[in-house]
Image: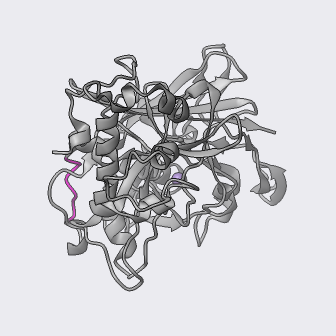
Amino acid sequence: MIKANDINRKSWIKYNKDSDFPIQNIPFGAFKSHSGQIHMATIIGDTVISLTKLEELGYFKNTSLLPNTFNKNLNKFLKQGKATWRDIRDQIAILFDIRNPELQKDQQHQKLILFELKNIALIKSVNIGDYTDFYSSKDHATNVGKMFRDPENALLPNWLHIPVGYHGRSSSIVVSGTDIKRPSGQVIDKLTNKPIFSQSKLLDFELEMAFITGEGKPLGQSISTDEAENYIFGLCLFNDWSARDIQKFEYVPLGPFLGKSFASSISPWIVTLDALESFKINGEKQEPEVSSYLKFSGPKQYDIHLDVLIQPNDESPTKVTSSNFKYMYWNMCQQLAHHTINGCNIKAGDLMASGTISGPEKKEFGSMLELSWAGTQSISLKNGETRKFLLNNDSVIMQGYAKNKDVRIGFGEVKNRLID
Ligand code: MN
């Protein structure tokens, strides 16, 4: 039993019942204050809590936290491992428990520690070293295979045997709120069937989730599916922006390159694997039987509801799809075991994205490519316009939450505007 997950705990910080961030969540992030100071943070309701200040004022002194942890980014915290992650989450839960007068009665300290969401700017909290993107949704891989290859053999022969992935570009991962510039590159001209240099005309989102790792094992060693959860810190929402026309011309034989590397965006709060403990479920049965290093025991999927909305200009947004993280065929433990089976090392602050998460129904597809079926169908927006792919000044908003009768653990959102 994880203490911070206690569903009966109430906080002295007030928030609505449907908040993404009840006291049972305690995600990790970072922000910049009005004065320009960087803080590591958590959030309860709409109240942002500076972990940097909590540490400075001695509130973590009875924990396993190393000195000067929360000062630059979360990497130093990520390095300290699961026992410390748990310890700090528990300590935060106790500090903000309505039964605890310590900080509740200390107005002076509260002035230094608590910030209103509207007065700060959320920033990227992790210095992401390496970024890997998987391709682990069977419905997505099947849809893409049907559109671009052979409807009869939509999945490539390796797909049911290995969690397919590629190494992406970590330095162009940006946080929610950052504008995304439409890229240019070489695309095939429809009339001449020859490559031309052009702005991408088939700009797309990919609905994904990503996990952030703790410090893995050294080069030459592997992480088993049984050990994997100890190396996964938490999850955020991930939009893997994709230029389909650039991607289509360049991707054979080495995979995605410039069609992906111009930007990916993440939600600012990392929700810990611990906070999601009660949302674990079994995934689809894997047939054919997987290689022994990919076998696992117990529920390893997570029931996390996901929505994507498109907001043209600043008009009212339209929900264009709803999916769920549970639709993944390969789970995170298998992804991490596969990633390290060749002895590849994992560092604190690596990011591994799921791949586009599509469900079986059309209304659950995780990209415009699938929703418009390669541009053959239109999606209607509330303002009367239609889309096949994204237009400039469209904002893409991704939201996610896990919910049961006891608690709602939300992710907030990742929202970015596409610009010229
Ligand atoms: Mn992707």
Residue 206 screen position, x and y as percent = 54, 44
Apparent side of residue 143 relative to residue 391 in the rendered image (left or right)? left
The secondary structure making up most of the magenta span is: loop
Q: Quadrant of the C terminus?
A: top right
Does the rendering let one see residue 10?
Answer: yes
Residue that extends furthest to the bottom in the rendered view of this protein: 220
Q: Quadrant of residue 44?
A: top left
User: In percent of the image, x 69 and y 51: which residue is there?
Assistant: 245
How are the residues colored? one colour
Front residue (pair 332, 267): 267
> Can I make out residue 162 in this image?
no
Quadrant of the image occupied by residue 384: top right
Q: Does 227 appear above or below 379? A: below
Does residue 53 sit above or below 196 in this rendering? above
Where is residue 186 shown, x and y percent of the image?
Answer: 78, 59
Left or right of 140? Residue 183 is right
Q: How many discs mark residues in the rendered view?
A: 0
284 inside magenta stretch: yes
* Relative vertical location of residue 107 with respect to residue 297 in this rendering, above or below: above
Q: Is residue 141 magenta?
A: no
Residue 203 picture quarter: top right
Image side of residue 294 versus residue 307, left or right: left
Residue 184 in picture, x, y percent from top left:
80, 52
Q: Where in the figure is residue 374, as x and y percent of width and height?
A: 59, 42
- Residue range in magenta is 282-288
Quarter of the image with the N terminus is top left
Above or below, 194 against 395 in this view is below
Residue beneath the point at 49% across and 50% down: 144
